[in-house]
Image (cartoon, rainbow, N blue to C red):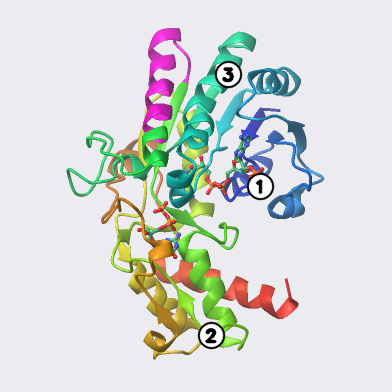
């Protein structure tokens, strides 16, 4: 039985990856950081099937102990401070988690067992102010936020451990991916949740920032398979994962309102609100995932329309249940 350790198992991607690995027969461990109130909602469905270990990206000893305990064949580093807006407010802490946290984890692996395969969750935010369209593995990085900068560090330290210590360390450059488990502060989930609440008469307005940025939005459930595939290859390498299609925030808003039968969405939306504007914006992201398609045989399965519908439907059920 193969063993996997997932950092960030309580986030959006962690539970999808855990479910996927369990379906492949893996023994799955996940790390959680100590909080005064545990945040296990996203893993409630699989809580009994995974083993949770206490570890924090700020603390190498805890990471080393978790690796000793789990004895994994594969480590998936999904833990990070992942919200771009917050990274402008807490740039130093973002660097500690999202950048140096990767080195702490790689050092822990190197100390315990250098043969453990390592997946680093890199991000399309590294492309930032894009120098080429669509973006692929060789596109130059130009991050536009402390989060993007920290992810560039995480990306290169992963590459460096591969080259320096001959470790099987890969980096998946994933474009935005969403789901009903997405954190409420990210724009897609904020929209789906607010649209449903407006539809049910629980909220008057949806207050947003810039509606013009375009993202290549995919479904998180499709993307975790690509993470796993990267670790099953003969050689470690880096891959871009996305859909090859992009849409503006405005298109997401329009479609979400349409899902609940509202066509005059402009009457409910306030845009360009200063609270939700960023000091530097990423305007246009779109993936060229042809390498992943060719080498991994991976392709996205869920369309943009299906994704929006899935998120609105899920929020409608949750709001009706009063959750
Ligand atoms: P989430 O923000 O939903 O989850 C982040 C996870 O990291 C949570 O489980 C969180 O735990 C954990 N975490 C945060 N800080 C620490 C810490 N100091 N020590 C230990 N754990 C910590 O992210 P996603 O699931 O959406 O994304 C997974 C990874 O992929 C992240 O690294 C993200 O940056 C990256 N990524 C995501 C993309 C996306 O569109 N979703 C796109 C590209 C990359 P807690 O519950 O305690 O807060
Ligand atoms: P990001 O791509 O990782 O920054 O993911 P987000 O979901 O946080 O943001 C996607 C895009 O939506 C960015 O270009 C934001 O500037 C834009 N946006 C517009 N209004 C909002 C808002 O109210 N909240 C968030 N999170 N993003 C917004």
| Residue at image location 47% in from the left, 70% down from the top | 308
| Residue at image location 58% in from the left, 63% down from the top | 180
**Where residue 148 appears, x then y in whole percent?**
37, 40
Instruction: Give 51 or 104, whichever is nearer the viewer.
Output: 104
Quick check: 292 above or below 261? above
Residue at mark 2? 204
Label for residue 7?
A: none
Segment colored magenta:
151-168
Q: Is residue 235 visible?
A: no
Quick check: 178 above or below 137? below
- In the rendered image, the residue lying farthest to the left is 132
Question: Are the residues tagged 3 and 2 within 8 Å (C-beta)?
Answer: no
Q: CA distance from mark 2 to mark 1?
A: 37 Å
Residue at mark 3? 116
For disc 3, the neighbor class at 10 Å (few under 14, some 14 to 19, many from 20) is some
- In the rendered image, the residue lying farthest to the right is 48
Q: Choose the circle earlier in sequence order: 3 or 2.
A: 3
Q: Choose the circle earlier in sequence order: 3 or 1.
A: 1
Instruction: Give 233 or 132, whichever is nearer the viewer.
Output: 132
Magenta residue check for 120: no
Quarter of the image with the N terminus is top right
Q: Place residue 233 in its image quadrant.
A: top left
**Principal secondary structure, stretch drawn in magenta:** helix
Residue at mark 1? 19
Q: CA distance from mark 3 to mark 1?
A: 21 Å
């Amino acid at each position: 039985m193969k063993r996997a350790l997932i950092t960030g198992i309580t986030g959006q991607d962690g539970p999808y990856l855990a479910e996927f690995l369990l379906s492949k027969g893996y023994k799955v461990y996940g790390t959680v950081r100590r909080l005064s109130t545990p945040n296990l909602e996203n893993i409630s469905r699989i809580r009994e099937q995974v083993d949770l270990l206490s570890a924090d990206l700020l603390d190498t000893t805890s990471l080393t102990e978790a690796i000793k305990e789990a004895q994994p064949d594969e480590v998936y580093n999904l833990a990070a401070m992942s919200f771009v807006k917050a990274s402008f407010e807490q740039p130093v802490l973002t660097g500690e988690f999202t950048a140096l946290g990767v080195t702490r984890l790689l050092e822990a692996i190197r100390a315990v067992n250098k043969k453990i395969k390592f997946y680093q969750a890199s991000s399309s935010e590294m492309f930032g102010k894009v120098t080429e369209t669509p973006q692929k593995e060789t596109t130059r990085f130009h991050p536009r936020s402390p989060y993007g900068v920290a992810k560039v560090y995480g990306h290169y330290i992963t590459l460096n451990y591969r080259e320096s210590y001959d470790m099987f360390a890969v980096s998946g450059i994933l474009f935005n991916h969403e789901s009903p488990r997405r954190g409420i502060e990210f724009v897609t989930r904020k929209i789906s949740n607010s649209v449903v609440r407006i539809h049910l008469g629980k909220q008057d307005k949806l207050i947003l920032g810039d509606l013009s940025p375009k993202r290549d939005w995919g479904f998180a459930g499709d993307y975790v398979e690509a993470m796993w595939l990267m670790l099953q290859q003969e050689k470690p390498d880096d891959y871009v994962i996305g859909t090859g299609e992009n849409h503006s925030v405005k298109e997401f808003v329009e479609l979400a309102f349409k899902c609940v039968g509202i066509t005059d969405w402009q009457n409910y939306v306030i845009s360009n609100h200063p609270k939700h504007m960023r000091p530097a914006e990423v305007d246009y992201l779109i993936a060229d995932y042809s390498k992943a398609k060719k080498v991994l045989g991976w392709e996205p399965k869920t369309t943009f329309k299906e994704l929006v519908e899935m998120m609105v439907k899920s929020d409608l059920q949750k709001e009706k249940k009063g959750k």
